[in-house]
Image (cartoon, rainbow, N blue to C red):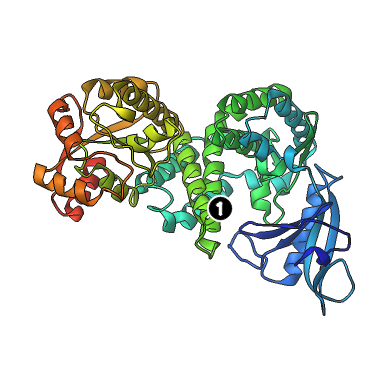
Amino acid sequence: MNVYSFPHPTQTLRVVQTHISYVFITDLFVYKIKKPVNFGFLDYTTLEKRKYFCEQEVILNKRLSPEIYLGVVSVVKTSEGYKFEVEGEIVEYAVKMKKLPEEGMMVNLLKEKKVTEAHIDSIVSVLVPFYQKAETGERVNSYGRIEVIRFNTEENFAQTKEFVGLALAKYKYEHIIQFTRKFLEENQVLFQERIDKGFIRDGHGDLYSANICFENVNKVYIFDCIEFNERFRCGDVCSDIAFLAMDLDFYRERSLSEYFITQYVSKSQDQGINKLLNFYKCYRAYVRGKIGCFTYASTQQIRPEKYEFLEQARRYFDLAYQYAEGIPKLIVFMGLSGTGKSFLSQNLMSKLPAVYLSSDITRKRLLSLPESKHYYAEFEKGIYTPEITEKTYKKMIEMAKEELSYGRDVIIDATFRDKKYRSWLLEGIKEVKAEVFWVWCTAEDNVVRERLFKRKENTCSDALWDIYLAQKDKFEPPKECSPLLVLDTTYPVETLMKSLVEFLKI
């Protein structure tokens, strides 16, 4: 495809790929082609099916945004290449849409921290009447049955099993499953009440910031509802509402998430949402994690975007774990320079997806210095003065607290040679739920000396032999830390990792 493939002049053409679509963005219009894929819950494998689901997409989305959806058009193979909206041999179909302003896309506004309560009010003003008018009744109500909900959740767990260890820790996977099954078992009456009171509707199914756009703060478009599977679109209104609330949490906008729920409940008078909110937030976060995994797996080229999909999946799964009342782990690798803290941290991250916080990297970022450049100095001089070191620890503690509050496991890699830094850490995270593990790395002097010499150009650390000796002289043994694992890092890495896995219960 190129700029000449379209029936109207266009100076620009941008192609965006998802796990199920190719989206062609021109100056005035957007064309969306469905990939010939089959994920079980979605089947676009024939041209006939893709045409049907294009038509369904237009019909269903006109409920919320009739101005945007312009119809289904053909893609034709010509002697000059593939073209949209011309006569000839039809090889594909596309949904044609009016182009929306990029600067108004909610996902972009969230990244720029520009979403306000006024934006949320506009969304609520559209959603409340939409759900009040959305189809309900016998056909739709069947999707609110606990058997269907259980099928959806179990399908998610089965489809993500192969990504355990890569995208989410095994212990988190098992905890989310246990939480979900227990909630469904203990709240059967509640789910039936939602059916009886008319809260099962033919809704949107994919209500999050990527599918919301503001022309201005008072004019909002909500688009791209799910057309390929009624089971995902029809269900409890709370499932849709929880999706957007979860998405606001994902972008670290907790106050806006809470405001959205408060306003929606107030305007809709649906008080029951609060009883189901965390369950559906967990479900929706898990679905987004699953989609991230699918996109990661289907991206053939080894490129930065591929790993961005994986990291995004990890963040969603961690959020699901937090909604499932899980307690994340904070693992502190401490000890003198050259004793293997960074080496073991990186090895652990191959088994436990976690946020890695290094004092070496944090220090240089605080000072706006290149991470890979060395700044050698005497002990407690240069960029290693006590004042800068204190700022470094405080920043790491602040970052750890933030990540833990969103269900993320955190690995901190720092000497923690002063007892006060260890005390600061425990005091700093006391407001969040976290299981803290201390790992004290040790090694004989001659081993450390050899390591420091060999690693000189392959590390962010600036520590040399004289710094190690000065640290050793001032190091305060972590007698107060518990639970504490002391590792002699001269042992084989396999032995060390076995000890770590057993200690961390992962």
Q: Where is residue 89 in the image (x, y as percent from the top left)?
A: 83, 77
From the viewer's perspective, tell me whether residue 386 is left or right of residue 4.
Answer: left
Amino acid on which disc 1 is placed:
Ile
Residue 489 drawn at (x, y percent): 16, 46
Position of the N terminus, as image quadrant, is: bottom right
The residue identified by callout 1 is: 291
Pick the residue in front: 169 or 31.
31
Closer to us: 442 or 58:
442
Q: Residues within 10 Å of mark 1 (few under 14, many from 20)?
A: many
279 or 304: nearer the viewer: 304
Instruction: Give the side of residue 200 with respect to residue 11, left or right.
Output: left
Quarter of the image for residue 330 reads top left
Q: Of helix, strand and loop, which one carries label 1?
A: helix
Residue at 56%, 52% (x, y): give it: 291
Picture quadrant where residue 84 is located: bottom right
Determine the image quadrant of residue 277: top right
Indicate the position of residue 385 as horizontal and vertical percent values. Answer: 30, 24
Q: Give the farthest residue toward the bottom.
A: 79
